[in-house]
Image: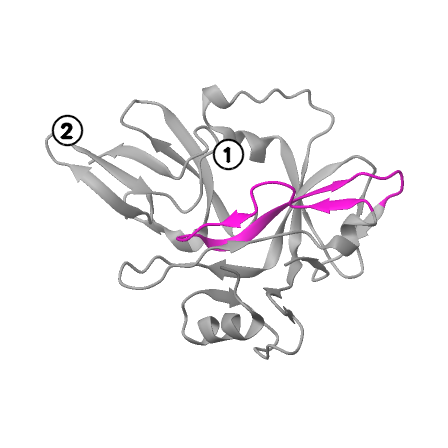
């Protein structure tokens, strides 16, 4: 949106994709051309291989900061 | 609970949350008010393309990319303010960057951002939805700005737009 932000797209466990803008300082390059967004882990389910994380801002599509993602 | 100016300064000094840059950290001087900190307009604004007939569908995903592709970024300069036309919406960000970290072993803070009433009286509405800056947010605050009156309004960087 602005020069100190990046557009982020996240795939949820449902297969749907959500998006948000995040401050560049919250994103790190994993060395493989992917950017990793810093989030806060809320809970995880090892058996179902999913985590609930708290995003820095809510997504446009779900209007929530809590999302379920694959482990 | 609303923090007073002295409590805000105390929290800033203890790094419970940050607001940067601040000209000074004196609760009796600007940018501090009795229970708020004034925030300035940043140096960029984003304007939706008015020529392209776009339709937004939140169900389709990729809204963030979509908004970027269908808008233009303008750099504000002191000598070249942006003229906000009547009934136009722009997005801007604050000059200050704020951070409200979550510390599991300590009190967490969030904040409210509100447009300045002085601007509202001129017909310029700043940040008219979602005023809460939640814990765990870090970055510049995006402001929605709309001109409700029939005259144009000049936006210059570092003018006080919110608190």
- The structure residue drawn at horizontal position 73% and vertical position 44%, both measured from the top left corner, is B125
Q: Is residue B46 left or right of residue A65?
A: right
Q: Single out the residue that lies furthest toward the front.
A: B1
Please, what secondary structure does the residue beneath circle 1 have?
helix
**Residue where numbered disc 2 is placed:** A48
Cα–Cα gap, marks 1 and 2: 29 Å
> The magenta stretch spans which residues?
B123-152
Image height check: is B105 above or below B112? below
Magenta includes B138? Answer: yes
Q: Position of residue B145 (x, y in %)?
A: 70, 44
Residue at figure coordinates x 63%, y 69% from the top left: B34
Side of B81 where B64 appears, left or right: left
User: Quarter of the image holding residue A19?
Assistant: top left
Residue A33 shows in the view: no
Classify mark 2: residues with Cα within 10 Å, few (<14), some (14-19) or many (20+): few
Residue A11 pos. (x, y %): 33, 30
Q: Is residue B116 above or below residue B14?
A: above
Residue closest to the eye, B156 or B51: B156
SS type, badge 2: loop
**Relative image position of residue B159 (x, y in whole percent):** 73, 61
Compared across the picture, whether A46 is left or right of A2 comes to left
Give x and y (percent) for residue A35: 34, 44
> Which of the image's four quarters has the C terminus of chain B?
bottom right
Does residue A52 appear anywhere in the picture? yes
Residue at screen point 31% across, 64% down? B106
Is B148 part of what is drawn in magenta?
A: yes
> Foreground residue, B78 or B126?
B126
Chain designation of label 2: A
Asked if B3 appears above or below B47 in the picture, the reply is: below
Which numbered circle lies on residue B64?
Answer: 1
Farthest-out residue, left: A47
Q: Name which residue lies at 57% across and 71% down.
A: B5
């Amino acid at each position: 949106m602005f020069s100190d932000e990046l557009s982020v797209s996240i795939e949820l466990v449902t297969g749907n994709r959500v998006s948000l803008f995040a401050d560049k300082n919250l994103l790190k390059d994993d060395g493989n051309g992917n950017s990793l967004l810093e989030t806060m882990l809320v809970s995880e389910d090892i058996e179902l291989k999913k985590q609930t994380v708290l995003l820095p801002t809510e997504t446009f599509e779900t209007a929530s900061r809590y999302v379920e993602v694959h482990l | 609970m609303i923090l007073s100016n002295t409590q805000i300064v105390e929290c800033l000094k203890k790094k419970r949350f940050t607001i940067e840059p601040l000209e000074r950290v004196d609760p009796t001087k600007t940018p501090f008010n009795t229970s708020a900190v004034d925030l300035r307009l940043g140096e960029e604004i984003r304007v939706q393309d008015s020529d392209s007939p776009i339709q937004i569908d939140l169900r389709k995903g990729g809204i963030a990319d979509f908004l970027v592709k269908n808008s233009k970024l303008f750099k504000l300069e002191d000598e070249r303010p942006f003229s906000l036309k009547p009934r136009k919406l722009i997005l801007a960000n604050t000059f200050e960057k704020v951070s409200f970290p979550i510390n599991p072993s300590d009190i967490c803070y969030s904040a409210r951002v509100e447009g300045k009433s002085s601007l509202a009286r001129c017909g310029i509405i700043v940040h008219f939805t979602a005023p809460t800056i939640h814990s765990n947010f870090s970055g510049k605050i995006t402001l929605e700005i709309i001109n409700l009156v029939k005259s144009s309004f000049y936006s210059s960087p570092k003018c006080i737009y919110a608190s």
